[in-house]
Amino acid sequence: QVQLVESGGGSVQAGGSLRLSCAASLTGSRYCLAWFRQTPGKEREGVASIYTRDLKTYYVDSVKGRFTISQDSAKTTLYLQMNSLKPEDTAMYYCAAAPFACYSDFWDKTEQYNYWGQGTQVTVSS
C-alpha cells in the first residue's frame, strides 16, 4: 500500500523560501513522483515531477528557476525546494505518485496519478 505524507508548509513573505517534504512508502522502484497545487475554485495544477529511475524532472513554466524537485538517495522522501516565493504560489500543495515513468505530455495530469497525500498549505504574503 503506497502512502504519501506531506509536511513543511507554512507562511512566508514574498521572496522567502520553504522546503516541502513528502514521506513516501512505495512498493517497487519505478514511480513518477510529483507535486501539485490547488487554490479554492481552481483545478489542481502540476508543479513539478521526477522519475525515480533516472531523476528526469519536469516543471511548470511559472516555477522554473525558482523551485527544485528532488528525492533522497533512499527514495523514501520527495522534496520541493521553493525559493523566491510569490503571493501567487499560495496554495495547498500535494504530492502524488504513479507506478510508471513521467512523460512530457501527461506528467501534470491529475488522472495519471494513483496515490495522493493529504496536502500541506503554503501561504505567501506580499
Image (cartoon, rainbow, N blue to C red):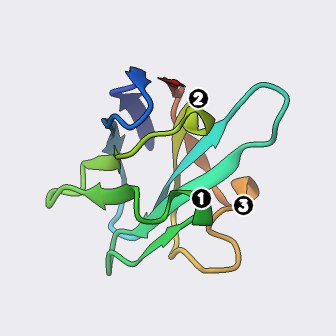
Q: What residue occupies the far front of the structure in this picture?
A: 126
- The vertical placement of 89 against 26, above or below, is above
Left or right of residue 117: residue 54: left
In percent of width and height, residue 59 lies at: 52, 66
Which residue is drawn at the image coordinates 53% and 28% (left, top)?
119
Q: Are marks 2 and 3 in contact (CB under 8 Å)?
A: no
CA–CA distance between discs 3 and 1?
16 Å
User: Which labelled disc corresponds to residue 109?
Assistant: 3
Q: Earlier in the sequence, mark 3 or mark 1?
A: 1
Residue 13's tag is none
Q: Which residue is mark 2?
A: 92
- How far across and down, in percent of the image, does residue 92 sit? 58, 29
Element assignment for label 2? strand
The first of marks 2 and 3 along the sequence is 2
Residue 8 position in % (x across, y down) = 33, 27
Please state which of residues 66 and 70 is positioned toward the viewer in this rendering: 66
- Horizontal arrangement in the rendering, residue 9 relative to residue 64 (left or right): left
According to the image, label 1 marks what residue? 62
Question: Whole-Å distance between the Cαs marked 2 and 3?
Answer: 17 Å
Quarter of the rendering containing residue 98: bottom right
The amino acid at mark 2 is Met
Is 25 on the left-hand or right-hand side of 112?
Answer: left
Which image quarter: residue 84?
top left
Quadrant the N terminus occupies: top left
